[in-house]
Amino acid sequence: MPEVVIAGIGQTPVEEHWDKSLRELAFAAIEAATLDAGGLRPQALFVGNMLAPQLSQQAHLGALLADFAGLTGIEAYTLEAGGASGGAALRAGYMAIASGLVDLALVVGIEKNSDQIGASVDAALATNADGDYEAIQGLTPNAQAALLMRRYLYDHAVPREAFAGFPLVAHANGANNPNAMFRRAISLEAYNRAGLVSEPLNMFDIAPNADGAAALILTRRALLPPGYPHRLVHIAGSSMATDTLALHDRADLLVFEAARISVERACLKARINPLQVDLFELCDGYSIYAALSLEAAGFAGRGGGWELAQNGASPAEISLAGSLPISTMGGMKARGNPGGATGVYQAVEAAMQLRGEAGANQIAGARRALIQCLGGPASSAVTHVLEALD
Amino acid sequence: MNQPSDESILLKPTRRVGIAGYGAYVPRYRLPASEVARIWTDGQGGLPIKEKSVPGLDEDVATMSIEAARNALNRAGVSPTQIRAVWVGSESHPYAVKPTSTLVAEAIGAVPNVQAADWQFACKAGTEAMVAAIGFVGSGMANYAMAIGMDTAQGRPGDALEYTAGAGGAAFLLGPADDSLAVIDATYSYVTDTPDFWRRAYARYPEHGQRFTGEPAYFKHITEAGQAMLDATGTTPQDYRFAVFHQPNTKFPQRVAEMLGFKKEQIATGLLVPVIGNTYAGAAIIGLTAILDAADPGDRIFMVSFGSGAGSDAIVLTVTDAIQLRRDRAPRTQDYIARRTPIDYATYARYRGKITMK
């Protein structure tokens, strides 16, 4: 099977891009990735997007973005898996190259939330839950996470402020990322003072929904342009798994089973043990999801994920100075949560780390990264292993 | 955008114009923001102001405009028969069709040899009327024109705007510069089509674009208008003793002042929103009245309004010696603020007609 390399990466800042449309945002990322790849022209476009039909009244993003990017004629379509849409698009691109059917693939994650505001955005986000049994009862994504966090606090007798470490690390890392929505570190006092959004979640337990686009050019090593300037990164493992869509159908609410399975399969494919990665870009859309993701990946036992975020005598394990850095460019919490573009942002940021292009947040000697995005409470989970090649 | 910030963008009349008299009005009732929070959020969350002014059962934009206009006339010492225009800017005109301004003109004795019209540009309708009055007097068509910005602002019960939607405003009698207590040095207007806040026909309450009302609307237009005014007049913030900006809440004017390079002391005198709320078309200009109450001859004042939709009028003035004689001919703005009767949410709901029986 051909080796799949990441030839180009591109991203826009994550923020409320009031003055830019869906297509303009996506094009900015495509242009950046194409330039980064030395001008390679893709044969296929895989779009990761979650809510364009509801929020921008725009479906059919494949043809739209291919045309707007001057690629009219190429194969192009959208992959949708809720918040894991970006990861799904990346996996589709990976499979296209790995199968040998496509030589050059463009993967774009795009989310444009700010075309609408308030209740209509909440209603659109709720379509990611089970419409007949959850959303219709008023259950929102925030409420789902709140239910899981309350259960976690109860079952594992964890103090409420144990979750502070996740947003604290994310904001500290986001401070050095020019594309991050929030670029200021926060204090434990600020976390403890923050107002409740959906008890027990406070404002800092929830990543902000925002607009953003990220893009990747995937190909085979032999097709790279002469004099290719970047340290080469390849996709060593890829996996996607699903769990029940509705929370009430789960045997155990506090296990992200799809996340566990997809890590296991992606690492098996990469022939590694998860403990061999130098960083983990996970889903920190809610601080409770970060804890559950750490447990699902095997970095902590059941009920122990929060301990990796504790800052005792030494820095937290998940900080840049720890043994398992997460959210190295701010994660969803500080970089911002661009919905279905998240999985592509994670790949772009992990590639920066493995190329040695992560600036002030560079993890010294990083060679291998695990990235994982989730749709809802891990109803969908897409995991990739990225590795630097010498 | 893409316009030169040279002097050609300034709106300057051929004849120099000034403020002959000014007057403020604030209703006596106050609704603490904590009362709104008590009813709608179980007392949770931050409060954008301390309290807002609420009109009584017998008050509306017409009665309040009359009070302010009479104060302006008293300060000017001009006969109302010399007024050739009465213009009222508001987003709470009592009638959809039938001018507020005819009612005000009649009540202050300015009829019948007078132009009268109502202005509407969300929160900058007051400065819009002022700029028009400057043109009217500055062209020589009239010696005196009354420009008023007044509102009894609407906030949907439970909406973020209910905390701040206040009542009040100000009136300015514009006249020749040699008979003025403050000379208009220049005005500049910056306008784009930016739908950040609106109320459609027959709708009772306005709608807004949440955070869209901030960066792309309020901050963009005020900083563009303010900076263009500074550039075109070749002045810096240090050249002004006072500054006042549209004040929809406490934070926005503080932040926009900092963005333009003004200091806290410069905006303190005109920053009234914490104690009377957002008086919409009256918000920037009632701040100006509080500044004129405190200013000395020779002081320069920098004002930028903001109206949703969206646009900003920047106006710079220099206070003259006449301020000392005319200031005490009418109640000061702080007198109205001190005349205060706190009410609870239920009384507010009754006074503002929030409880509909049919």
Image: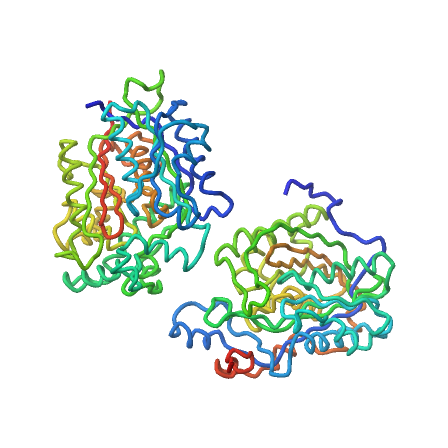
**Quarter of the picture holding the N terminus of chain B:** top right
B91 horizontally vs B43: left or right = right
Q: Quadrant of residue A178?
A: top left
Q: Which of B140 and B334 is in front in this view?
A: B140
B47 horizontally vs A3: left or right = right
Q: Which of A6 and A54 is in front in this view?
A: A54
**Residue at position x 20%, y 57% in the image:** A247
Give the vertical position of B282 relative to B338 (above or below).
above
Indicate how the structure is coloured in the image.
Answer: rainbow
Residue farthest top in this picture: A226
Tell me where residue B346 appears, x and y as whole percent: 48, 83
Tell me where residue A28 appears, x and y as whole percent: 45, 35
Q: In which quarter of the image is residue A222?
A: top left
**Residue at position x 38%, y 41% in the image:** A110
A359 horizontally vs B64: left or right = left
Tell me where residue B337 appears, x and y as whole percent: 61, 77
Can residue A215 be seen from the camera position used here?
A: yes
Tell me where residue A183 appears, x and y as whole percent: 40, 47
